[in-house]
């Protein structure tokens, strides 16, 4: 009797195992099951609290206290989940290959519908979503950073002038080097490069380009963390292979 290959029965490295989970669509199943179990446990706990308050406690004040305690527990649990996002590294599993593919659709895949979002039920689920969504939408997040940086430069015209001046300075240096044949005079070339580097640093500092860059990085990071943690793991395209496994086809 022949059995299909099962990577669970082998001692495989974690990246290979995660690739298998991603290709077969089990990451999406794990994320959805975690959300369903949390919703079911919350409903069961609420029903048990209501039943106990009806049978053992008939005082309305005591019932209100039990309900308020459940609300506080839920609030603190969600606050803890959000704070756990500050401790994880969203780029831990990001590779250069994640930027080589096509950019996912902004409307259908990146934004999705209203049902594509849910609050992460635990820090582990938030970590799973962030690591996977950062890999999936790396090109989208990079495009958002460029957009935020352009908007920041538009609001700070002095920083935009400084950035253009630096680019023009290095372009002029390259043209002069090709015209004057500085490749044959390495000492003069290195001296001009060092002077250009110092001039670039002074221009960037005086025009506050670093503040525009920092603000764009901060806004991009917050948007990426929130989107990646709230966005459900939903496959874009799926097909069923001959062995019965679900295959995720990435465009």
Image (tube, rainbow, N blue to C red):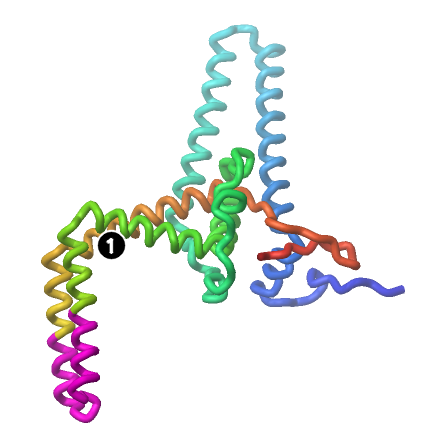
The percent coordinates of residue 173 (x first, y second) are 17, 77
Magenta residues span: 169-195
The overriding secondary structure of the stretch rendered in magenta is: helix
Label 1 SS: helix
- For image coordinates 63% across by 56% down, the residue present is 249
Does 70 sit left or right of 174 as displayed?
right
Identify the image quadrant of residue 202. Answer: bottom left
Does 7 sit left or right of 165 as displayed?
right
- Image quarter in which the N terminus is found: bottom right
Residue ranking furthest to the bottom: 184
Does 153 sit left or right of 244 as displayed?
left
Q: Was residue 230 drawn as part of the magenta stretch in this picture?
A: no
- Image quarter in which the C terminus is found: bottom right
The percent coordinates of residue 232 (x first, y second) are 54, 42
Q: For this rendering, which residue is in front, 221 or 37?
A: 221
The percent coordinates of residue 199 (x first, y second) are 11, 69
Does 103 sit left or right of 30 as displayed?
left
Residue ranking furthest to the top: 59
Q: For this rendering, which residue is in front, 66 or 215?
A: 215
Q: Is residue 121 visible?
A: no
The residue that label 1 is drawn on is: 213
Q: Is residue 148 visible?
A: yes
- For image coordinates 16% across by 54% down, the residue present is 159
Q: Is residue 116 above or below residue 89?
A: above
- For image coordinates 59% across by 44% down, the residue present is 31
Identify the image quadrant of residue 8. Answer: bottom right
Q: Is residue 27 above or below residue 45?
A: below
Q: For this rendering, which residue is in front, 48 or 178?
A: 178
- For image coordinates 57% across by 28% down, the residue present is 42
């Amino acid at each position: 009797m022949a059995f299909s290959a099962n990577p669970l029965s082998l001692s495989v490295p974690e990246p290979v195992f995660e690739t298998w989970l991603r290709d077969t669509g089990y990451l999406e199943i794990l994320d959805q099951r975690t959300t369903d179990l949390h919703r079911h446990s919350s409903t069961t706990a609420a029903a048990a609290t209501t039943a106990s308050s009806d049978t053992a406690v008939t005082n309305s004040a005591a019932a209100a206290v039990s309900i308020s305690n459940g609300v506080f527990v839920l609030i603190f649990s969600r606050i803890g989940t959000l704070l756990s996002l500050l401790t994880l590294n969203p780029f831990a599993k990001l590779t250069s290959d994640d930027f080589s593919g096509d950019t996912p659709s902004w409307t259908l895949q990146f934004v999705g519908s209203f049902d594509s979002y849910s609050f992460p039920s635990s820090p582990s689920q938030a970590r799973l979503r962030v690591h996977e969504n950062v890999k999936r939408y790396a090109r989208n997040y990079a495009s958002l950073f460029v957009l935020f940086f352009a908007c920041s430069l538009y609001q700070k015209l002095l920083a935009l002038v400084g950035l253009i001046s630096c680019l023009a300075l290095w372009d002029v240096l390259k043209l002069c080097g090709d015209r004057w044949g500085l490749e044959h005079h390495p000492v003069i070339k290195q001296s001009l490069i060092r002077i250009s580097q110092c001039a670039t640093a002074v221009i960037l500092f005086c025009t506050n380009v670093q503040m525009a860059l920092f603000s764009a990085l901060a806004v991009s990071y917050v948007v990426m963390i929130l989107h990646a943690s709230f966005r459900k793991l939903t496959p874009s395209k799926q097909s069923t292979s001959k062995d019965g496994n679900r295959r995720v086809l990435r465009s």
